[in-house]
Amino acid sequence: MIVLNDIHKHYGRVRANDGISLTLEPGRIYALVGENGAGKSTLMRVLAGHTRPTSGELVMDGESLSHLTPALARKKGVGMLYQDPLDFPAMPVWENFQLGAPKRTKKEVIDIIGELSYRLDACFLPDEPVSSLTVGERQLLELLRLLDLGATTLILDEPTTGITPEQKQDLFDLLMKLAREEGHTIVLVTHKLSEAFEMADSIFIMRQGRLVSTLTPPYDERELVQLMFGEAADGEVEPLPELRSKSGTPRLSMRDVLFAGPKYSMGGLNFTARPGECIGLAGLDGSGQELFLRGLCGLDRMPGGAFDLDGTRFAANDFSTLRKAGVQFVPADRLGLALFPDLNLMEHITLAFPDRDGDLADFYRSQCVEKFNLQAHPETHAVSLSGGNQQRLLLSLIPDETRLLLMEHPTRGLDAGSARQVWNHLNRRCADGATLIFFSPDLEEVLEHSHRVIVFYDRTLAAVVEGDDISMEVVGALMAGKKYDELKEGAA
Amino acid sequence: MDTFALTIAAILMAGAPLVLATLGETLTEKAGIINLSLDGSILLSAMAAFACSATFDSPWLGMLAGACVGAAIAGVLGVIGIFLGQSQLAVGFILTLLSRDLAYFLGHNFSRQPGPNLGLWTIPGLGKAPFVGLIFGSQSPVVYLSLAAIAFCWWWMYRTEAGMRLRAVGESPRAAFGRGIRVRMVRLYYCLAGGALVGLAGAAYSLAVKPGWGRPQGCEGAGWIALAIVIFGGWHPVRAALGAFFFAALQVSGIYLQEIFPSIPAPVFQVAPFPMMILTLLAVNMGRMGWVQDIVRRHPLFKALSRGWSIDAPAALGQDFDPKKGL
Amino acid sequence: MNRDSLLTQIGWLALTLLLALALTVIVAWPAGAPPLETIYVLFKGGVSSWSKIGRVLAGWVPLTLCSVGLLIPFTARLWNIGVEGQVIMGAIFCTAALRPFEDGGGTGVIILALAASVAGGAFWALLAGLLRVFGRVHEIFSGLGLNFVALGVTLWLIFGPWRRPGVASMSGTKPLDISLWLPRLGTMSVSWVGLILACAAVLLVYILLHRTKWGLKMRAVGENPKAATLFSLGPRRRLLQAFMLCGGLAGLAGATQVLSVYHRLLPNISSGYGYTALLVSMMASFRLSLVPFICLFFAVLNVGSIQLPLQLGLDSSLSGVIQGIMVLSLFIVQGLRLWLKQRKEAD
């Protein structure tokens, strides 16, 4: 049994964990829910020994400890599975499995992997580099490794992002088995309520660093949402804007386009989009969505084919030309790819609107503060902004005349309130005639905000889905490789 | 045939210090640290080795001194770069200039002085054998040292648990930390180990390949070439060693070419390694260029070739890691 | 770093100097150098007479030109290690421009030579830039390789096509006609033209980096080149501009060496100023206001060290040793400050 007693974790003035106490009993599955930024991951990292708490104690097997280290956590049987598996992509499977474990020969390791895989109906080639596995497979390998090391408490941080619905079901079945049959303790960190309902014996709800409540079944969704979001739960997302008539020049018309990125290329792309349309891209990580967006804006090359933008032909996708023509790309990694960390807001404005001369203070006020509610002093450096403010800054830097907006994961790392504001803004842009193409690893977000969904599988455009077919079952199956005609036949 | 064998013997000798330096830096960079002080380090170790050898009349003591000096310089870089959080490139660069000036300053009294060198090892009986006899019958011990180093480094990196940990640290320090590996200490160890090999390289110059000390000594610029060879060799000890011998071959052939073409001035041959260095680095990066990838895609024959061509640096090369920040 | 009070900053600076002094004494001890006497000879050798001060200033000019030039690529987070070669190329182009004028020339010829040197340095820097931007060869390697190539070109010219008839020696090419020497400041060996050029360069770099949009864009490119692409800032073009500007200033430094110091092309025409300039910029933590003063200090050390072999039997590379130790001490002290700050935060 594990008890966390009054755990505090402060980063300067930010209280990521503000006095949290909870108990974990063996054989049970717990869900730790809260929106982005609530402090769930921080708390679990404390439990797994990957971070030291500022104060508080952990009680394990009756022994009281002020903090854990990775080695100590392993001895106590605690293992954490990160959303992004913490492994060694360039190294082979068997070495990934063996690192950090007591000394064994290569043959012994291969035997163990084989046995564990057999029990769980998986298959791993021991000499293949881990980079060749899918995210789901890397997760499973990591899970096997933790079990091999004797983990009895397993923490999974957002495990279902980036895996197919099928893989998710397999994972949940496995977790149930580990808890019920082998008496392990499972903690599922998630911001998806449906998963919590499905799996958990108890739900811990965190908000702004505090544990606000512990719920037991039967679960009331409204009560859960209320506790998770507080007053902000009352905000509503505006519905998808209506599309105008089908006639008129299409906004985007792709003909046999071939995009080539650094790791792979993707060809035979034919697609048409209308002004005001919101198009979501669905697919597993690396299936082609990123290349699709990057190719359309000109960051990756287009060695074949051509596309039309409002009737103007582009046989070459030069980034600057496309940008001037009204194509804007917004990456998901804000500080890493889209902003200048040590430059302040005014400097960002100056760089984004080079044609405006003179004093930009008024422009800043009207553009950022009034339009986007970016409450920050203009001299603030971008790196000091919160995630929500960074996204607001990014959006405010996009010119109003943008015709084709390409966004990677618009609400990454944002709390519910900020995410809602972002979608309201994007919906308004579409209503004004801009076309939005976006992707998100959160399938629900893609389904909710798209007029049409393009599904990618194995670096090809698998299908374009619209209307009633925009559903978890259909899109999930397409993402996993089922062919669209087979699905339609099966339904008929 | 005899000339060919003698050429090989010359290449092995000329390449031995370069191999040692390259192997050392491969170890260091595999752990994620870039040691720019190589060039100055080789010079200072060479001077220290010669000085020690002349003072104590023992070239092997000189080799030890060289290794210690190389490790010490790398240790300074390691501590300041790993534990004090300063830029590895900046500190390494300062150290290369500092070590070079220190070598000339402290070596002032040893300049152009006579001193013992390592001499040659004769294998009895082998000298009469054709071809092999000409290469190994009477060869400098640094050649054997370099060959042993190649085998040892390969075995260490790919056949031991410690070597696995080394590669893990350079690949993903965060994941390594999560597995309980002490990332910063591992980096420091390989900094020191790599530095020791670099020091041996310097000693090999002043005690075998270009015996003596002077200003210039004759091995100026070797450190930079070694740094480039590490990249060219894909951070793999055997491939890097082959790269080192390739450059040694260029240098040896330069001497022959100079005899054949006396009209081409000497400076051309002396600086030839450096444009070669740039060209090899260009060639290494070519696989990533867009237009090259287009050609490869259209001609499947090239695809097979290209798979062996591209190499990836240790993912965390040159990056800082602070365990206090946790994961 | 900037939030500490002035007193704290001075305290840390004093610690740096003390550390540098201690380290210098430690490393100089094996050579048998008496510490106090050595320091005395060094500084006396630099400032004890007007002629020596003149030589210090003559060394200050090219060092300052190179160091302020380096601030531009550093703003873009580039390491222009190739400065040394760019100085040499500037000197070569300068000499080449003057060769038709063996019998002398006027101001126009000098201006032509200066322009040629800027072009030469910029061209050499452009090569390194192209290798970096399009060939993805790190500028450390391309710069260094080109340094050695430039040296090779110099040697080939001095012993080959530009050889003095009957004399093929390390003393270089035929000396320039006196009309092509830059005018001197009084009786001192420094030229006022050189001094003006150096001061103008400081001003130019200040205006460019801190008072123009161009400077802001360069800073953005250095901060985050990928974001710079997204903002259509044309990072590749700007990186090349940064290289070329720095190279041009370095070339000018080469020209001052030819026109006002040696009056001919020598093998060692760059005198290591390129590498020393890199040390200066690091020592100044890339703050423009500190650069001219550190250059002056380093120039004093360089001139003073010439006395060492004569008066104390020591090698003149001691000045380089001291310069290296000073920058190293700065990094050590910076690191200690960082380490202490992190320990305080953890508690």
Image (tube, helix red, strand yellow):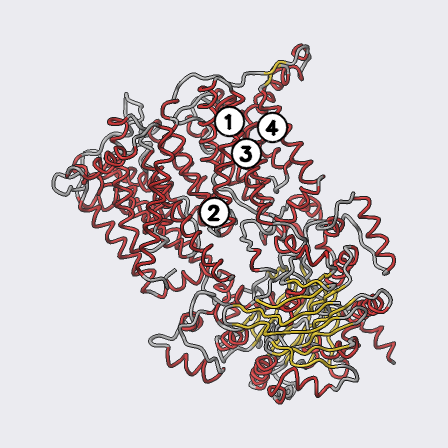
For this rendering, which residue is in front, B267 or C288?
C288
Q: Position of residue B216 (x, y in %)?
A: 40, 27
Query: Residue type at mark 1?
Result: Ala
Mark 3 highlights which residue?
A: B196
How far apart are the alpha carbons under marks 2 and 4?
30 Å
Q: Chain of mark 2?
A: B
Number of the label disc, if any, that sits on residue B80? 2
Q: Position of residue C8 (x, y in %)?
A: 34, 58
- Tell if the residue under mark 2 belongs to the same chain as the one under mark 4: yes
How far apart are the alpha carbons under marks 1 and 4?
12 Å
Q: Nearer the viewer, mark 4 or mark 3?
A: 3
Residue located at (68% from left, 50% from top):
A90
Against B34, residue A331 (above or below) is below
For this rendering, which residue is in front, C129 or A204?
A204
Query: Residue type at mark 4?
Result: Ser
Q: Is residue B132 visible?
A: yes
Query: Residue type at mark 2?
Result: Ile
